[in-house]
């Protein structure tokens, strides 16, 4: 049995559409692999079924590798398990005013503990736009002081 080019095109489109149902953003690469095989089979129609399946597997896996290694390097990994001591001393920019018994927001240049922006508290009044340093992590917010 030899699959025609349009079989692969239908399979590729069906897998790409199946990606709408699967929230993992992974099935699309197998669909694009099917479209690639459809193109190759349209040009070289004498490929055996084994060659077509090997080409589809190889193309799909290559696209997955390219996506995860080149186009989507995890530049902003969440740092789950990072101790609070690793965060103390980080410098950020105050987005909203903060003071005693008043919460504000601080933005960091790189994500700390998985987020770029954190709710913060301070012992003294601090104005927006001021650089602040983390002195403690207390649950879901950080305590800061002027840097």
Image (cartoon, rainbow, N blue to C red):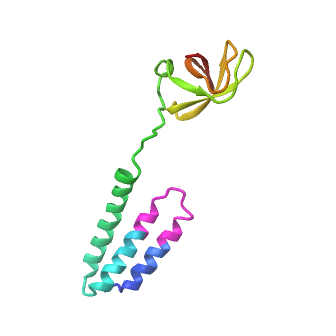
In the rendered image, residue 99, in percent from the top left (x then y), is placed at 71, 17
Any magenta on residue 53? no
In the rendered image, residue 58, in percent from the top left (x then y), is placed at 29, 66
Q: Residue furthest top?
A: 123
Q: Is residue 20 above or below residue 73?
A: below
Q: Residue furthest right?
A: 101
Left or right placement of residue 20 versus residue 9 in this view:
right
Left or right placement of residue 102 versus residue 53 in this view:
right
The residue nearer to you, when weighing 129 against 66, is 129
In the rendered image, residue 70, in percent from the top left (x then y), is placed at 35, 52
Which image quarter is the C terminus in?
A: top right
Number of numbered markers: 0
The residue nearer to you, when weighing 38 against 1, is 38
Left or right placement of residue 100 versus residue 92 in this view:
right
Tell me which segment is drawn in magenta. Answer: 15-31
What residue is at 46 percent from the left and 40 percent from the top?
76
What residue is at 35 percent from the left and 74 percent from the top?
36
What residue is at 26 percent from the left and 85 percent from the top?
44
Left or right placement of residue 136 versus residue 37 in this view:
right
Any magenta on residue 21? yes
Which image quarter is the N terminus in?
A: bottom left
The residue nearer to you, when weighing 128 against 47, is 128
What residue is at 64 percent from the left and 23 percent from the top?
120
In the rendered image, residue 9, in percent from the top left (x then y), is placed at 42, 80
Q: Is residue 8 above or below residue 76?
A: below
């Amino acid at each position: 049995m030899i699959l025609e080019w349009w079989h692969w095109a239908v399979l590729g489109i069906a897998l790409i559409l199946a990606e709408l149902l699967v929230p993992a953003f992974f099935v699309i690469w197998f669909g694009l692999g099917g479209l690639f095989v459809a193109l190759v089979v349209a040009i070289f129609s004498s490929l055996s079924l084994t060659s077509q399946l090997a080409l589809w597997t190889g193309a799909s896996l290559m696209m997955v590798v390219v996506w995860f290694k080149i186009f989507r390097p995890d530049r902003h990994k969440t740092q789950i398990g990072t101790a609070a001591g690793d965060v103390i001393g980080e410098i950020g920019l105050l987005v909203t005013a903060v003071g005693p018994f008043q919460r504000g927001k601080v933005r960091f240049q790189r994500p700390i503990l998985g987020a770029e922006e954190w709710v913060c508290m301070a012992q003294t009044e601090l104005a927006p736009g001021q650089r602040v340093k983390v002195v403690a992590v207390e649950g879901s917010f950080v305590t800061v002081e002027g840097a």
